[in-house]
Amino acid sequence: MAAAFVLRPFFFVATHSPEKSCVQFGFFIFASGRDISVTGAFQEVDVLAEERQSEAGERKMKRNILMYVFGVAMLSSSMLLAQTTTPVNPQNKDQVNDRRENQQDRIAQGVQSGQLTAGETKNLEGREANLNREIRDDRSANGGKLTAAERQQVNHQQNNLSKSIYADKHNAAQQNFKGEVGARQENQQDRIAQGIKSGSLTAGEAARAENRQQGINQQIHADRAANGGKLTGAEKRQINRKQNGASRQIYREKHNGVRQ
């Protein structure tokens, strides 16, 4: 907020020689509980020549001096106003939300590309959900803000989560979608990834959705292992019913009005 200020102008004539004198002007600005003296430039006046000027010329000279003083006063007061206005420091803004959004974008990219499996995403989003609850509780206890110590702790946890995202995205585990069932799995993952990136799925909702996908994936893997890498017709129908249920869950949670 800008501080209130009052201009207190002063003028005096300083004589340099019998022929020359000058009008010196300045003003005090009272702002933020302190007086600040600002002195203007000098306006040279030839006294002898001035005596020879007409009355109209004298009025013109005085008007020019006053306009000059007024202009400098306005300029200086504008500079003071800028100095007494508390600047918005981007570093003072809460960076926690930006960091969380960045982490979610990285997870969404990993889900969509297949670099993150459903199990890996479930674990990452579970940790993100726990961290979000911690941030919410800390803010509730401190009037909506985080203390410096809390901010430092959150940043440390986000650093660890960031390392886990990188490690999971660059390990050997990849989503492996095969056939018609695999196409359905991939579609579900794309929808979850879109929800994570847009914020329509919170970390907790994404963790639950991926937990359900992980269970389906494990069943598919077990069924294929028991049948030479293939699924029977009955197994495909069962998987499809489970995916229908998972699809409805994804839709509901993306449209329930709860945002990340």
Image (cartoon, grey):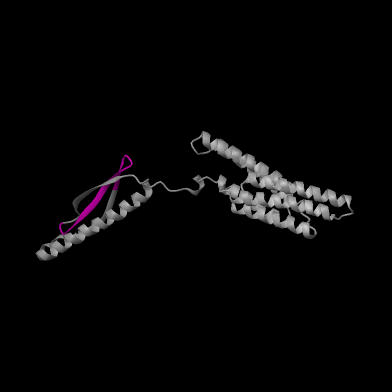
Q: Is residue 162 above or below residue 72?
A: above
Q: Position of residue 162 (x, y in %)?
A: 67, 47
Give the residue displayed 52% in from the left and 45% down from the top.
Answer: 94
Q: Is residue 185 left or right of residue 79?
A: right
Q: Position of residue 125 (x, y in %)?
A: 67, 45
Q: In the figure, residue 187 lies in which quadrant? A: bottom right
Q: Which residues are magenta?
A: 18-37
Q: Is residue 258 left or right of residue 32?
A: right
Q: Is residue 85 above or below residue 46?
A: above
Viewer-proximal residue among 40 and 103: 103
Viewer-proximal residue among 190 and 94: 190
The quadrant the N terminus occupies is: top left
Magenta span contains residue 20? yes
The count of marks equals 0
Viewer-proximal residue among 152 and 252: 252
Q: Is residue 5 left or right of residue 54?
A: right
Magenta span contains residue 133? no
User: From this viewpoint, is residue 212 visible?
Assistant: yes
Q: Position of residue 170 (x, y in %)?
A: 75, 52
Give the residue displayed 50% in from the left and 46% down from the top.
Answer: 93
Q: Position of residue 90 (x, y in %)?
A: 49, 49
Name the chief secondary structure element in magenta: strand
Give the residue displayed 71% in from the left and 44% down from the top.
Answer: 123
Viewer-proximal residue among 156 and 57: 156
